[in-house]
Image (cartoon, rainbow, N blue to C red):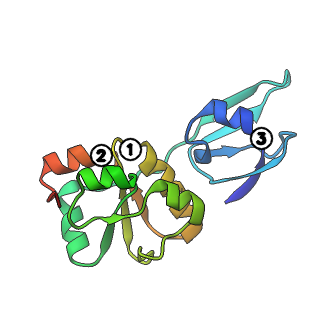
Amino acid sequence: MMLCRLSLAALAALHPVSAMYRVSPSLKAPMVPMAPLPSRIIARGNGMLQARMLSMPTNEYDLSTISGEVEAGKAVLLDVREEDEWNEAHVSFATHCPLSALEGTGVPKNVDMSKKIYVHCKKGLRAQKASAILGGAAGGAEVIPLKEGIDALLDYGFPNAK
């Protein structure tokens, strides 16, 4: 994680997953901790901000192998939806840790960070946020946000615990 200069208002206006931006340190604003990920924000002479996309690292995965990796003890499937969503339906072998808890405490005690961690939610946004938190806090852990949400995982054939 690196520290960058950017006002919180400017950062929030750029993208809802603001922890996914790398920022030029030449900006004159309070220091904000940021994860070094897919974009660079540069200051222009007229005081305007401009975002430039960088190549984004791809996390390759195959849904057909996730359950086997979890059952073999090589990976963890982390569900970051809130308690009421979890109670409605969840994958039987998933570990529950709501995003709200991750934002408050960082790495949960019930997740083995030495394993590959697949993170999912309802549609993908919270999985991205949780992955940024876990990746920054765990230093080197392989954290993979799934673009598929709970409905897609259950439709694919992952076992429903409800």
Q: Identify the residue position indicated by label 2 in the image.
A: 149
User: Residue at position x 42%, y 51% from top?
Assistant: 127
Q: Position of residue 12 (x, y in %)?
A: 65, 35
**Marks 1 and 2: in contact by CB < 8 Å?**
yes
Kind of element beneath mark 1: loop
**Which is nearer the N-term, disc 2 or disc 1?**
1
Q: Identify the residue position indicated by label 3 in the image.
A: 6
Q: Amino acid at mark 1?
A: Gly
User: Residue at position x 26%, y 48% from top?
Assistant: 150
Q: Amino acid at mark 3?
A: Leu
Classify 53 as above or below 68: above
**Residue 125 location, quadrant:** top left
User: Residue at position x 24%, y 70% from top?
Assistant: 69
Classify 146 as above or below 41: below
Residue 124 tag number: 1
- Measured Cα–Cα span from mark 3 to mark 2: 32 Å
Q: Count residues near mark 3 (Cα–Cα under 10 Å), then give few for <14, some for 14-19, many for 20+.
A: many
Q: Position of residue 29 (x, y in %)?
A: 85, 41
Quadrant where the image shows the N terminus = bottom right
Q: Nearer the viewer, mark 3 or mark 2?
A: 2
- Measured Cα–Cα span from mark 2 to mark 1: 6 Å
Q: Nearer the viewer, mark 1 or mark 3?
A: 1
Q: Count residues near mark 2 (Cα–Cα under 10 Å), then give few for <14, some for 14-19, many for 20+.
A: some
